[in-house]
């Protein structure tokens, strides 16, 4: 099917499956699903070429609701299955839906390795800082002191920062967005889809039932603007309700400065997502609430050959060097002898 | 140099006595850096070319760099060559080539009494003896008096042969001493050195100096046999008669699996995806396939066993012939994902090259103790077909058969090999690829009436529909589901229905696999029933006792799930069933669960294959 045909025909509805959506009312997952179903028709990818793969958890129900190909797999392993799918057919657009427990705890290893290999997967990590499906135990992104059923006296684990993890795994595309900011979410999904190589997106997602206050600092109208800095390519890092604060480097550390006359925009950090060296993006990722605003948007986007591109290059090179495989000559290669 | 020695000494030496034997087992043993595998391979190839049947078994150290000169650092190569058909690499060697004291110490207990020993006396110094744990020199005193010992200063003679080569260090020269040993053994068994000379020329084509030094030392070893007083007998093992004509080459079990996978993919007209994590003794399959990318083979070395299995599921879902291999510990890690494959009903091959367990166990040694693991080591009702090749060469056909079953029935399939089958080599009559039957592997592309878990009436297989096919988008996963629609369902009757349907599908494969064949009397006192890699020892043992006039029948299971249709009937025809296996009785347990039989067990868990005599003795004992 040609892309032009697909593009002209598909609408949001084409991506809605016949399955009844079963998340808790008010769950942030609904908004992400809705945005995804809106963005996909824009991409011009034939529906049959799209595959959603998930692990286990609330977010991992996602593929059932998308009228595309899909695999609802086992806990933490979605990146491995997605890697196999992409290696079998590189023309497919393969999306991994995971969560903070699925992707960073039981499946942490696979997340690291799929990112470092730059497998052309779009990995969306729904971060709600809690285990939802198992009804409320703390997760690898839960803050220290978080009281849950499994941590009645408060969690003593230090949490992981998913963006820092992805960057240290050499991810070529790393972004952060949020369920409630639908415009930003849709922009980031689109950018991830267009990236050639592994794209990692952390989505702050609200678990209204088990951890409803986790993202208050980034959602409540009175505080969020002071806690988020929206990254825009080539633009200085400015934030605040009145856009009166900026980020400046003080030695190797970023600091908040107020733009009230003495300090001009020229002194601020200018966002460049394409820096080869990931140190800058890593620095951004370390800006954490409450001391610094949280960076939203694309922290890093660089071009590197993807795993499957290189895999097929090698197959091609081998065919060129040795000719397309011939069983007869393979069987007869090496030391043979004849019995008459 | 060597040739001068030869001509001056040969005047004194009498013509050696010629002796003919039906078969001989030689062990080459030395440090892992001594080139024993190459030496053994060369001797084996020449013997095969001369028309002997051959069977080999390498004994490779578990540690890559165990200290030189010690027993853990030994690398051994056992070759059995014969003028009749061989089934094993031999119970015990008649000839031992010991490159150092450790090699003597480790192999002497297995050597036939009266056997021949060639030792490199240059290594029997204080240091060498100490490393091997000898308190005194075994070459002095009476310890070896029952053997035919040839003391050869191999290192010195090698250096002598290379004396006039300028710029070659003693260390480099010493690397050639395996060629001296090989030349000497070639002389002893009256085989030409030409094939090995040829081999040096091709293998080291870019390094003529290496060709020159090795060839020289090889010749020197050969002439040494001709001239040295110590060698008075030459042994001749005549060619095998009545061998099927054709072109042959040697294959190990793992090499055969590599060829089988590539062939199956071509016959199914699919790319081959192979996802795997390195593990002994399965890694050579990954390495073998990685070299065959021009067959559209996509190899993926995953971050762990689980990822390897996941990638294979993804690749099967998206339409390649997908396979993985591991050993017991890795299969344990893969189990959860294998169960996903069972529920998704996708075709793929999972090879388990068994090694000694439990846990890390004996990585380089063989065992058959994962039978129950592959049958039952997963949560829930999880039926998977299990095939077990009996010999290295059988791995080729059975890999293809396993892939055929996987695709026909849309199911993961286990191929249960073992360390012995994987590393043992034997002659393979090279087939004509055109005569291998194609594997029917069609994707469904017709959306009309399609449901993900609709089933073929005969095989109960669901259709294989791959992403990229318009109008057939579907979602499947590991949750409980309704048959036909594939929709998630926790309804009690839906669950029971799909569980029973899957069980029925796998049981139905019994219609597709061959019945069990029995060799020997059709009914009677005793049936010896084996499975997998113990085939050679059992067959040889049964033939031996049959030769003594005992009435014994023999059968070998290659299909462990489902079992051949006629198995119950076969078992019912004998008063006693003897089941030899390299575990504590797993097939016996299975048989007693399935059939009203009492089974006599012969079990061994030493990391080693059965010896023929162990099985033969047990048969005699049972029939006494
Ligand atoms: S438990 Fe939380 S994350 Fe899960 S569906 Fe309900 S609201 Fe959403």
Image: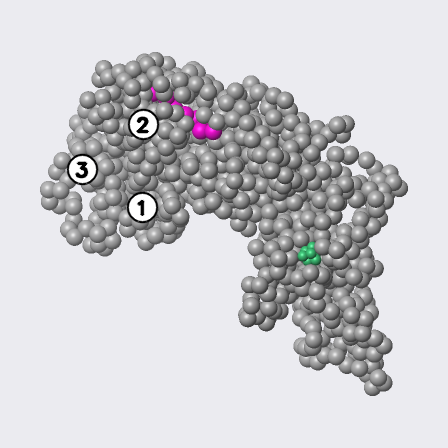
Q: Identify residue for label 1.
A: B74
The residue under the point 70% across, 75% down is: A290
Q: Can I make out residue B356 in this image?
A: yes
Q: Are marks 2 and 1 on the same chain?
A: yes
Mark in front: 2 vs 1: 2
Residue B60 relative to residue A162: left or right: left
Where is the C terminus of chain A found, in terms of image quarters? top left
On screen, residue A339 above or below A25: above
The tag earlier along the polypeptide, 2 or 1, is 1
Q: Position of residue A232 (x, y in %)?
A: 81, 66
Q: Are marks 3 and 2 in contact (CB under 8 Å)?
A: no
Q: Which type of secondary structure does the marked residue at label 2 adopt?
A: strand
Mark in front: 3 vs 2: 2
- Answer with the quadrant where ligand 1 appears in the image: bottom right
Query: In the picture, residue A20 is in which quadrant?
Result: top right
Where is the N terminus of chain A found, in terms of image quarters? top right
Q: Identify residue for label 3.
A: B149
The residue under the point 31% across, 49% down is: B72
Numbered mark located on residue B599 in the image:
2
Query: In the picture, residue B230 is in which quadrant?
Result: top left
C-alpha span from label 1 to label 3: 20 Å
Magenta segment, prevailing SS (helix, strand or loop): strand
Span shown in magenta: B554-561
Residue A42 inside the magenta-drawn segment: no
Q: Are marks 3 and 2 on the same chain?
A: yes
Q: Residues within 10 Å of mark 1 (few under 14, many from 20)?
A: many
Q: Position of residue A57 (x, y in %)?
A: 64, 52
Residue B532 relative to residue B527: left or right: right
Q: Which type of secondary structure does the marked residue at label 3 adopt?
A: strand
Q: Nearer the viewer, residue B231 or B428?
A: B428
């Amino acid at each position: 099917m040609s892309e032009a045909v697909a593009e002209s025909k598909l609408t949001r509805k084409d991506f809605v499956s016949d399955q009844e959506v079963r998340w808790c009312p008010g769950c942030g997952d609904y908004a992400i699903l809705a945005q995804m179903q809106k963005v996909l028709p824009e991409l011009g990818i034939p529906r049959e070429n799209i595959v959603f793969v998930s692990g286990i958890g609330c977010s991992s129900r996602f593929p059932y609701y998308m009228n595309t190909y899909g695999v609802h797999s086992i806990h933490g392993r979605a990146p491995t299955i997605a890697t196999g799918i992409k290696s079998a057919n590189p023309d497919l657009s393969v999306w991994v839906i995971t969560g903070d427990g699925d992707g960073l705890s039981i499946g942490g290893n696979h997340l690291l390795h799929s990112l470092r290999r730059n497998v052309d997967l779009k990995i969306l990590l729904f971060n709600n800082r809690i285990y939802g499906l198992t009804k409320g135990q703390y997760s690898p992104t839960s803050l220290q002191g978080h009281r849950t059923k499994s941590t009645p006296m408060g969690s003593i684990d230090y949490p992981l920062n998913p963006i820092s993890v992805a960057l240290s795994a050499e991810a070529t595309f790393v972004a952060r967005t949020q369920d409630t900011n639908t415009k930003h979410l849709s922009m980031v999904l689109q950018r991830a889809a267009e990236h050639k190589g592994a794209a990692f997106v952390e989505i702050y997602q609200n678990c209204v039932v088990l951890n409803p206050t986790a993202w208050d600092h980034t959602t409540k109208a009175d505080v969020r603007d002071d806690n988020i800095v929206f990254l825009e390519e080539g633009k200085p890092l400015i934030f605040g309700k009145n856009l009166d604060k900026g980020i400046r480097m003080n030695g190797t550390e970023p600091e908040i400065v107020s733009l009230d006359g003495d300090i001009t925009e020229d002194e601020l950090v200018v966002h460049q997502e394409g820096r080869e060296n990931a140190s800058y993006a890593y620095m951004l990722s370390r800006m954490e609430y409450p001391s610094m605003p949280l960076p939203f948007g694309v922290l890093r986007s660089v071009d590197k050959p993807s795993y499957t591109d290189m895999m097929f290059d090698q197959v091609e090179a081998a065919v060129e060097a040795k000719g397309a495989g011939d069983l007869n000559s393979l069987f007869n290669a090496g030391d043979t002898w004849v019995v008459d | 140099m060597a040739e001068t020695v030869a001509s001056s000494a040969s005047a004194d030496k009498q013509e050696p006595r010629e002796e003919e034997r039906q078969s001989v087992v030689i062990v080459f043993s030395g440090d892992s850096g001594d080139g024993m595998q190459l030496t053994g391979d060369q001797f084996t190839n020449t013997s095969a070319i001369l028309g002997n049947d051959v069977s080999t078994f390498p004994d490779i150290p578990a540690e890559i760099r165990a200290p030189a000169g010690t027993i853990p650092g030994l690398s051994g190569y056992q070759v059995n060559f014969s003028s009749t058909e061989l089934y094993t690499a031999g119970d015990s060697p008649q000839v031992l080539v010991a490159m150092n004291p450790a090699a003597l110490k480790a192999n002497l207990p297995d050597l036939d009494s009266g056997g021949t020993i060639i030792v490199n006396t240059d290594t029997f110094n204080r240091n060498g003896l100490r490393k091997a744990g000898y308190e005194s020199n075994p070459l002095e005193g009476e310890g070896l008096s029952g053997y035919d010992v040839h003391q050869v200063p191999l290192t010195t003679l090698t250096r002598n042969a290379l004396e006039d080569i300028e710029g070659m260090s003693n260390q480099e020269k010493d690397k050639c001493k395996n060629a001296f040993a090989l030349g000497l053994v070639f002389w002893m068994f009256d085989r030409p050195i030409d094939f090995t000379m040829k081999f040096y020329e091709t293998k080291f084509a870019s390094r003529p100096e290496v060709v020159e030094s090795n060839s020289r030392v090889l010749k020197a070893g050969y002439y040494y046999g001709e001239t040295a007083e110590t060698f008075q007998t030459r042994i001749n093992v005549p060619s095998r008669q009545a061998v099927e004509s054709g072109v042959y080459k040697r294959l190990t079990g793992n090499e055969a699996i590599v060829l089988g996978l590539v062939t199956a993919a071509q016959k199914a007209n699919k790319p081959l995806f192979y996802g795997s994590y390195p593990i002994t003794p399965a890694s050579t399959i990954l390495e073998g396939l990685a070299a065959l990318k021009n067959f559209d083979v996509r190899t993926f070395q995953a971050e762990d066993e689980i990822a390897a299995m996941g990638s294979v599921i993804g690749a099967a879902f998206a339409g390649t012939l997908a396979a993985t291999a591991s050993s017991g510990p890795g299969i344990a890690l893969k189990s959860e994902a294998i169960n996903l494959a069972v529920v998704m009903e996708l075709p793929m091959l999972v090879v388990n090259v068994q090694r000694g367990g439990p846990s890390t166990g004996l990585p380089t040694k063989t065992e058959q103790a994962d039978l129950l693991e592959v049958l039952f080591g997963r949560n829930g009702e999880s039926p998977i077909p299990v095939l077990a090749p009996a010999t290295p060469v059988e791995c080729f056909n059975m890999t293809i058969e396993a892939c055929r079953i996987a695709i026909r029935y849309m199911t993961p399939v286990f191929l249960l090999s073992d360390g012995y089958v994987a590393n043992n080599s034997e002659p393979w009559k090279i087939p004509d690829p055109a005569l291998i039957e194609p594997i029917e592997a069609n994707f469904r592309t017709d959306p009309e009436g399609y449901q993900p878990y609709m089933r073929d009436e005969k095989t109960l297989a669901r259709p294989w529909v791959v992403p990229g096919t318009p109008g057939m988008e579907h979602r499947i996963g590991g949750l409980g589901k309704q048959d036909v629609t594939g929709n998630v369902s926790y309804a009690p009757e839906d669950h029971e229905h799909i569980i029973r349907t899957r069980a029925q599908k796998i049981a139905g494969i019994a219609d597709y696999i061959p019945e069990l064949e029995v060799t020997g009397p059709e009914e009677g006192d005793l049936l010896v029933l084996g499975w997998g890699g113990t085939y050679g020892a059992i067959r040889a043992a049964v033939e031996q006792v049959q030769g003594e006039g005992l009435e014994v029948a023999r059968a070998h299971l290659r299909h462990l799930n489902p079992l051949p249709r006629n198995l119950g009937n076969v078992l019912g025809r004998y008063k006693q069933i003897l089941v030899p296996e390299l575990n504590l009785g797993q097939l016996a347990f299975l048989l007693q669960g399935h059939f009203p039989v009492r089974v006599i067990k012969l079990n061994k868990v030493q990391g080693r294959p059965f010896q023929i005599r162990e099985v033969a003795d047990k048969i005699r004992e049972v029939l006494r």
